[in-house]
Image (spheres, grey):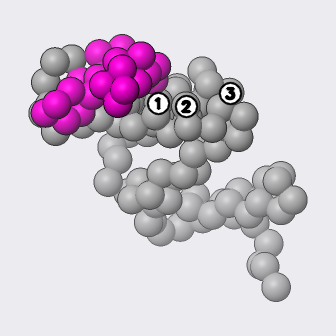
């Protein structure tokens, strides 16, 4: 019954599968996939978990390079989703104020929050 459920499951990325050995991507252990493939797979899984919500939180976003950030942005756009990325940085470009679901200020345009 478990094997049948795994076999018939819909996966968010072509080439993703669960075997007796664990999770595989393109017939290789997931751990051997490139960082970009792992990221694409993980974002796809996150967006597939609740397609009605369409919001995904990525922690440790400071570890992502520009290509990875661009990939996430493209996937979010294609899925009509929001991705919130936690990053550490300096300066106003790292500041976004959201109130009642709307962006109220970005960067130097932000007001002090009381």
In depth, the one of 52 and 105 nearer the eye is 52
The single residue placed furthest to the bottom in the displayed view is 114
Circle 2 residue:
48
Residues at marks 2 and 1, CA–CA distance in whole angstroms = 6 Å
Residue at image position (50%, 39%) is 46
Residue at image position (72%, 34%) is 52
Comparing marks 1 and 3, which lies closer to the viewer?
Answer: 1
Q: Secondary structure at mark 1?
A: helix
Residue 45 seen in render: yes
For the N terminus, the image quarter is top left
Residue 30 seen in render: no
In depth, the one of 20 and 46 nearer the eye is 20
Circle 1 residue:
44
In depth, the one of 67 and 43 nearer the eye is 43
N-term mark: 2 or 3: 2
Marks 2 and 1: CB-CB under 8 Å? yes
Residue at image position (79%, 72%) is 111
Q: Residue 37, located in which quarter of the rendered image?
A: top left
Confirm whether the magenta stretch covers residue 18. yes
On the image, the x and y values in percent for residue 63 come to: 32, 54
Q: Magenta stretch: give its range.
A: 1-25
Residue at image position (87%, 59%) is 100
Q: Is residue 3 above or below residue 84?
A: above
The single residue placed furthest to the right in the displayed view is 100
Circle 3 residue:
80
């Amino acid at each position: 019954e478990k094997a049948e459920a795994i076999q018939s499951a819909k996966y968010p990325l072509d080439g993703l599968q669960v075997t007796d050995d664990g999770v595989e991507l393109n017939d290789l252990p997931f751990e051997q996939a490139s960082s970009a493939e792992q990221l694409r797979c993980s974002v796809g899984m996150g967006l597939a978990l609740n397609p009605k919500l369409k919001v995904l939180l990525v922690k440790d976003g400071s570890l992502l390079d520009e290509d990875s950030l661009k990939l996430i942005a493209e996937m979010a756009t294609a899925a009509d989703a929001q991705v919130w990325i936690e990053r550490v940085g300096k300066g106003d470009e790292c500041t976004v104020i959201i109130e009642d679901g709307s962006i109220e200020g970005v960067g130097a345009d932000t007001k002090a929050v009381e």
